[in-house]
Image (cartoon, rainbow, N blue to C red):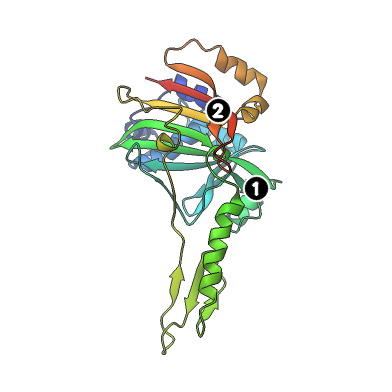
Amino acid sequence: MSNIIQAFINIVNSPIVELVDYYGGKNRVNSVGKALEIYIQDAFAGTINEIDELKRLERLEKVFSYQGNQNNPPDLILKNSDAIEVKKIQSKNSAIALNSSYPKAKLYANSPMITKACRECEEWNKKDIIYAIGYTTNNYLKSLWLIYGDCFCADREIYERIKDTISSGINSISNVEFTPTKELGKVKRVDPLGITDLRIRGMWHIANPNKIFDYIYEYDESKRFQIICLMKSEKYNSLPLEDRDILESLDIDGIKVLDIRIKSPNNPVKLMEAKMLVFKI
């Protein structure tokens, strides 16, 4: 079963900086966003250097139970393990666009924002979720954060309270016709002829990890590429001992495995024990 440590090690061993050049020939990819998604797939599947596409696809089938699309999170689910959401940004400090999906500390099977295929890909109720946030310039990957949602997203009740309050306010408007929707609301027949509808959709953003965690990590302008993995210590300790031993015994320049403390997303005056993995070239 794959996990974030294996993905980190695979990237350390094969850091692909020129994403489009690398994947353009193998997969006919000309979009850096799509190349980033494929790189994340390969990192978790251990197929970065696999040149036989059929073997690669067979490996992906063994590692993942679900692959989504940009309209329905998550992008990937590891079999019997974590969900993964891939985000591309073009500035090292720009906010992360989450569109209609609010930030997630965990992914829940009863979420109305996920598809039936995602809900039924395996037996599950709740999953940890990894945000893979890639900072790209032109066709180059400059940095990559692999960060668990519960390190920087509050519990879902915080976001749902805002969403539900807005929806209730919209629904309290008199003399208009409302339609059930997964979004904030949809008002039908706004005008006297009944020919105009209003779709009300949330557009969520969350701050960049470089800003959120500037008290524990400073972006290194002198490096071509850097990857940062962040998770709670309890999550790190729950991962296979064999993988942790391999990681901690790596003798490669630029690698750091650090014990740190981070602010709780639900109560910032409380600090949580965490693990941060860093690699720079």
Residue 100 percent coordinates (x, y): 48, 57
**Three-letter amino acid code at the position of disc 2:** Arg
Residue situated in front as seen by the camera: 281 or 277: 277
Disc 1 to disc 2, C-alpha distance: 35 Å
Residue 121 is tagged as 1
Q: Residue at x 69, y 48 (%)?
A: 125
Residue with the mark numbered 2: 261
Of the 4 image quadrants, the one containing the N terminus is: top right
Q: Residue at x 32, y 24 (%)?
A: 224
Total residue callouts: 2
Residue 2 percent coordinates (x, y): 60, 30
Q: Is residue 79 visible?
A: yes
**Three-letter amino acid code at the position of disc 1:** Cys
Q: Residue at x 46, y 60 (%)?
A: 202
Residue 104 percent coordinates (x, y): 56, 47
Say which quarter of the image contains residue 263. Answer: top right
Q: Residue furthest right?
A: 123
Residue situated in front as seen by the camera: 154 or 247: 154
Say which quarter of the image contains residue 225. Answer: top left
